[in-house]
Structures are given as C-alpha cells and as structure tokens.
Amino acid sequence: MKILHVLDHSIPLHSGYTFRTLAILREQRALGWDTHHITSAKQEKCTVLEEDVDGLHFYRTPPAKGKLSALPLFNQLSIINTLAKRLDEIVPLIRPDILHAHSPALNAIAALRVGRKHGIPVVYEVRAFWEDAAVDHGTSKEWGLRYRLTRALETSAFKGADAVTTICEGLRRDIVARGIPEQKVTVIPNAVDIEKFSVGGTGDASLRQQLGLTGHRIIGFIGSFYAYEGLDLLLQAFPAILEGAPDARLLLVGGGPQDDSLKQLAAELGIQDKVIFTGRVPHDQVQRYYDLVDILAYPRHSMRLTELVTPLKPLEAMAQGRLLVASDVGGHKELIQDGKTGVLFKAEDPQALADAVLHLFAEEERWPDLRKAARHFVEAERNWPKSVSRYATIYRRLTGSGAENA
C-alpha cells in the first residue's frame, strides 16, 4: 500500500499538527505501508524541493512568485495551484495508491484536482475547521463573508473526497450535518505515545526554589496562550482559590498572543506576586515543570472551536497520571469522565473553576484513583497503534486491497 500524504507543513517545524503527522507516519510504516510526503508552500523557511528529516523524505512546494500571490484570496489560490502543480510532477514518479490530504481544505482541493486527473482516490483528513480558528485569532468574523467562503470550500472538499477522516466526534457530527453520508466519515482520534510518558515524576527541588514555589500547592497550565484556552478565567478564579487555599500558586508555562494581556489582568486582580509566568521553555525541559504541578487546569472558553475539537494537552496530562480540572466544553467531555479521570466544571464560570480546584485540594484521598483511571484510559483507548489501525478499513475500501496486511 503506497500512500502520498499531502500536508500543510511538517517537521522540522514543531506544532501539534506536525507531531500528529509524525505519529501517523510512524505507525503506518510499522504496519508495512509505504508512505510518501509533500508539503504546501506554507512550509516556512524552506528553499529546497526535497529534503530528508528524521528518516522521512519530504517533497517541498516552492511558493508562487509575483505580487498577486501575496494578496488575500489570491494567496490561498496560489497555495492550491502551486501544490497541485507540484503534485502533478511527483505523482507519476511515486504512483501512489491513495492521496491522503490533511487540513486545511486548500490541500484537499489540490489533491482532488490531481487525483481526478490520475485516477487516484483521495482521503481528506480534517483536524480542525480553520474558519473557526481564524475567528479566535481575530482574522475572521464568525459567519462573516470570509468565514462562509472558507466553510463552503471545506464542504466542497468533503463532498469531493472519496473518504473523510477527522479527529473527534464533535467534528464528525458537524461534517455529517452538512449532508455528508455518515459511512463516509471515520474518526481517527488524537492519541499519545504511551512509552514517552511515565507516572509519578518527582518535582525538582532546585527548580521549585528557583521559581519561588517551595512549600506551595501548584495549579498549572503548560501550553500556548491563545484566547480560547481561557487562561483569563483561570486568573479570575484565582482570588477565590487563594481564599480557600492561601498557599496556592499559579504556574503558567509557555507564551503566545495572550501573554501581555494575561500579565496585565494578573496585575489588575492584585495577584501578580502569586502567579509565575515562565515564558516559553525548551521542549526537553517541559517535563520538569509538569513534575512541579499538583493540578493542571484547562479552562477553555465555550465556542465552536472548543465545543467541536478535542485538545491534545489533557491527553498528555492523563498519560502521566496527572490530576486535572477542565471546563465542560464538548472537546473536553469527549476525553474526560467527570469524577473518574478528571474533574469538569461549568465553562465560563470562574467560581465553578475555583470550587473544582478547592474540592480537589480537600480530597487528596481521591487522587490515586483519579490518576490511575486517567492513565488507564489513555493506555486502553488513546494510543497511536489503535488509532492508526482505523485507516486500514478506509484504504482497503478505496483500493480493493488488504490494506491491513499491505
């Protein structure tokens, strides 16, 4: 089975997108499938047509030239056109059985154009609806003209693809609601590399002292500071947490668009001396910060993006047997069983968040069971071999071959 994966970007760039891709490719190769890989012109700082990264060969797409390609709408069209042209060059060399395009829809449109020309079935994998992400980033207005155009393009890609995959039930339901047959849509859920996560890491006393956290109970968030993550709610909840647990401290590890506004909010709330902003830390140091945290908080706001999409960070926390509290948005409810693998609180309610944290602090006898159940869920349900094995049925149906043994 020979699959050509059509990607927005890839390693050596680091993102949740590239890490999921890497896991998929690793597991597909372990199944004996022959994977090939091409990225769009959105691969940053890339000046070569081909390169090898971590044992994988990537075909790259050069960006379009000319002033038009930098203008809104025209830049999106140029991404489709340049990717389709590059695909048309390499498909005859590779002769793939499947074109597997991954979000965004620009990649799917290019793959569909080339797939039809060469008679190759196309799988379109949706990791998020990019129009919803654009709303959070402030580059689009929900149900505005750009939003509706992007959504229409996405729906067109669903209809044209021979099969559609997505990462969670929330996205699957939305796709089906657009008139796409249920049997055409398969969930390939996000997962974690179990072997990379261990349970029971001990906090580094020197790091704890360096951060001024010795003798304190720590609530933490480790990740990117985007508006939808709801870190403003976490800060708003913290004065109430301090009333019930004066020794509590808030550890925010990472950075992003909300960095400055969060620091300003902490000052306005008068808690700036109780909140530690570390800034971004090297990837190989992140575990040291995880090991300091007593309770991880995921207070995502309720919006289309968070109601439909499951995040990866809570899974990584559960793989380590961590305690966590999370807002009851749809993406979290797919992952976390309230009171068993974690604690859910009412979204958009700072007091509910504070109460959830204080109840956990007061019930330490529950912690071992919560940690054990969280780890077990990931081991049993959210490991990459189990997730990636779901592609076999799709590929077999589209090619008429025994994909699971190819």
Image (cartoon, rainbow, N blue to C red):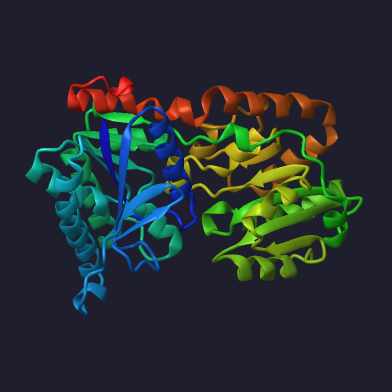
Q: Residue at x 78, y 26 (%)?
A: 368
148 relative to 397, above or below: below
Horizontally, is 15 left or right of 9 in the view?
Answer: right
Image spot of residue 360 (x, y percent): 78, 35
Observer-nearest of 205 and 223: 205
Q: Residue at x 70, y 44 (%)?
A: 296
Q: Is residue 336 visible?
A: yes
Residue 250 picture quarter = bottom right
> Looking at the picture, how far across and down is residue 303, in whole percent?
46, 48
Q: Nearer the viewer, residue 158 or 99?
A: 99
Q: Position of residue 315 (x, y in %)?
A: 58, 37
Classify 355 as above or below 213.
above
Q: Can see residue 177? A: no
353 or 157, which is in the foreground?
157
Q: Residue at x 72, y 39 (%)?
A: 356
- Where the C terminus falls, by quadrant? top left
